[in-house]
Amino acid sequence: MQVAMDITAKCCHKEMESYGQCVASHPSTWQQHCQDLKMKVAQCTSSHPVIQKIQTDCSKEFTEFEHCLRENQNSPTSCSVHVAHFLGCAETVDLSSARSPQPSILCDYTNF
């Protein structure tokens, strides 16, 4: 999972910064106010092979986490069990096949 976080930090810093500022500015309505910025982060990271592999292998856990967030918008900390399951899954994903360079990827990820 650290690899995915590093990719996001390196390749999508601007998007993550904007999203984080929006969430902080709208603590009780961030799901509605920050949806477009959340989508920009998702678009930025989704083309990366490592992220694609984690999304594929852990889609069930991630879907359950997202569902929990939608149901508990005012108390996202109540979804800590769901995020723990997703992170646990992500830690077990074999990323060896997801690290081959692809010319379509704009961010240099060969150092992850």
Image (cartoon, rainbow, N blue to C red):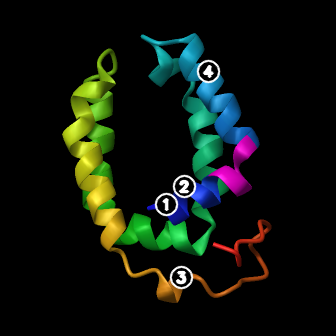
Secondary structure at badge 4 equals: helix
Residue located beneath label 2 in the image? 5
Residue 46: mark in rendering: none
Q: Earlier in the sequence, mark 3 or mark 4?
A: 4
Residue 77 falls in image quadrant: top left
Task: Locate the N terminus by quadrant.
Answer: bottom left
Q: Earlier in the sequence, mark 2 or mark 4?
A: 2
Horizontal side, residue 11 vs residue 69: left or right: right
Instruction: Name the amino acid type tagged 3.
Output: Ala
Question: Is label 3 in a helix, a strand or a loop?
Answer: helix
Q: Which residue is mark 4?
A: 22
Q: Position of residue 30 (x, y in %)?
A: 49, 19
Report the magenta residues as a range. Answer: 9-13
Label 1 neighbourhood size at 10 Å, few (<14), some (14-19), many (20+)?
Answer: few
Disc 2 is placed on an element classified as: helix
Among numbered discs 3 and 2, the one appearing first in the sequence: 2
Contact flag, marks 3 and 4 (Cβ < 8 Å): no
Lower position in the chain sequence, tag 1 or tag 4: 1
Measure the alpha-carbon separation of dots 1 and 2.
5 Å
Residue to which mark 1 is pinned: 2
Q: Are marks 1 and 2 in contact (CB under 8 Å)?
A: yes
**Amino acid, disc 1:** Gln
Q: Is residue 112 visible?
A: yes
Distance Cα–Cα, label 3 vs label 2: 15 Å
Indicate whether residue 106 is drawn in magenta. Answer: no
Query: What kind of residue is marked 4?
Result: Cys
- The span from disc 3 to disc 1 (Cα, nearest Å) is 15 Å
**Residue nearer the viewer, 95 or 46:** 95
